[in-house]
Image (tube, rainbow, N blue to C red):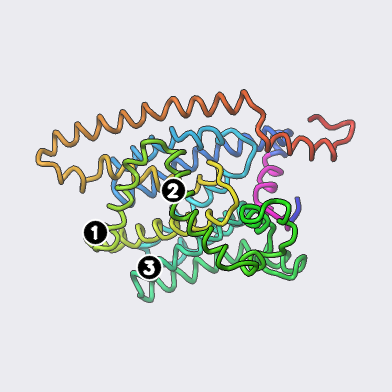
Amino acid sequence: IQVYTGYHGPGYPTAIAVVGVLLRDLFLSAKLISVVSAVGLLVATGRVATALAGSRVAFLSVVFLGLNPALVRYSFAALSDVFGAVLFWSAMMVWASGLDSRRGHLALWAGCVAGLAYLARYVNIVLLVMPLAALVLRRERRTVMQAACYVGGFAILAAPLLISTWLATGTVLANENHRNVAAGLYGWGRAGEFHSLADVILESPAFFLKRYLMRAGFELPLKLFHFTGYVALFWVPGLMLLGRRCCTGGVEPVCRLHLASVLGTGVTAFMALQLTGWIEPRFLLPIMPVLAIATAYMVASDEVLEACRNRAVGARCAALVAAVIAVSCVVPAAKAVRDMYSREAPEFVSVGHNLASLATQSDVL
C-alpha cells in the first residue's frame, strides 16, 4: 500500500487489503467492496432524502438510483468509484444527523468520514464545502462549533496523507490529476510538461477559462443528459424546486441547512468534475444521488402534489410517472451489466498488465 500515489489516496488499497485478509482473494475483495458500497450508497441516499423531503421522496430516490445504469455497472467492478461515492454520501448523512444537535460529536464523526472519503478519492475534498454552506445560512455559535468539529475530524484522518504528500513532493495537496486536465486542454503529448494545476492554468488563463466555461455550460450537462436519458426532464426542474426551497426559507431551519449543505456540495463536485479532460459515467457517481433525489422530488413531493387541484388524482399520476421512469431504467441497467461482462474494460486490461509485471510464479492472476 503506497501512502502517496499520483491519482488516488491509500483508502481503497487499504480497504482491499483488510477484506483480502478474510477472503484471500484481492480481486474478489475489490468486487465485494463495490457491492457493499453500492448498497451503502442507496441507504445513505435514502436517509438524506428522508431528512430533506420525507419518506415518499426517499423511497423513489432509492428506486431511481438503484436502477441507474452507472451505479449498476460499477457496483460489481474492481474500481474505487462506488467506494468513494458511498463515503461521500455517508459524510453527508452523518452531517445531516448532527445539524439539530447542540453537541459537536456527530459533526466530528462526519468530518472523519469525509477524511476517509478524501483518502479514497482526491476529488472528495469538495466535502469541505458542506459546513461552509451551513455557515452561510446560520452564523450561530453552534454552527461554528459544528463546522470546526467537522474540519477537525477531516484533518485527523487526512493529516497523515497530507503530511506524507508534503514530504514526498513538497506540496500538501500534490497529485497527478492535473495531467488529466492538461490532456483535455493540450493533448496527452504535452501532459507531462506540467507539474501542477497552477502550471496548467497559467499556461494560458484565457484558454483555460474558455474551455472550463464551455464544459460548464455545454459539455458536462450534455453528458449528464446522455447518461440519464429523458429522466433529465424531471431532475432539472426538480433541482430548481429544491434550490427555490432552500432560498425562500419556507421550510424548517434545520431542513434548509441540510438542503444548502447537499446542494452546495453537489454543485462544487459538479464544478470540480469539469476540470478533468474527459467524463465517464463512474466519475459522476457522487452527484447521481442528487439527481435521483431531484427526480423523486419533482415526481412525488408534497410541494408538487399540493399544486394539483385534486391531490388524489395528482398522487395517482405521480405513481404512474414513477413507475414509467423505473421501468424505463431497467433496459439501460441490463445493457450496462451485459456490456460489463461482454467487453473487457480498459481499466481491467491496464490492471492486468500491472499485476503481470509484479507477479511471481506462485501468484494466481
Viewer-side label of 2, 1: 2
Residue 333: % across, % down = 47, 29
- Which residue is found at the position 36% from the left and 41% from the top? 232
**What residue is disc 2 on?**
221
**What residue is disc 3 on?**
102
What span is in magenta?
4-19
Residue type at the position of mark 2: Pro
Q: Which of 188 and 312 is in front in this view?
A: 188
Depicted 333 relative to depicted 105: above or below: above
Which label is found at residue 251? 1
Q: If the image is split into quadrants, where does the C terminus sit?
A: top right
Of the numbered discs 2 and 1, the one sitting upstream in the chain is 2
Q: Is residue 185 magenta?
A: no
Residue 243: % across, % down = 31, 57
Residue type at the position of mark 3: Arg
Give the spatial CA distance, label 3 vs label 2: 39 Å
Please rate how many residues cluster around mark 1, counting C-alpha atoms within 10 Å: few if below 14, some from 14 to 19, many from 20: few
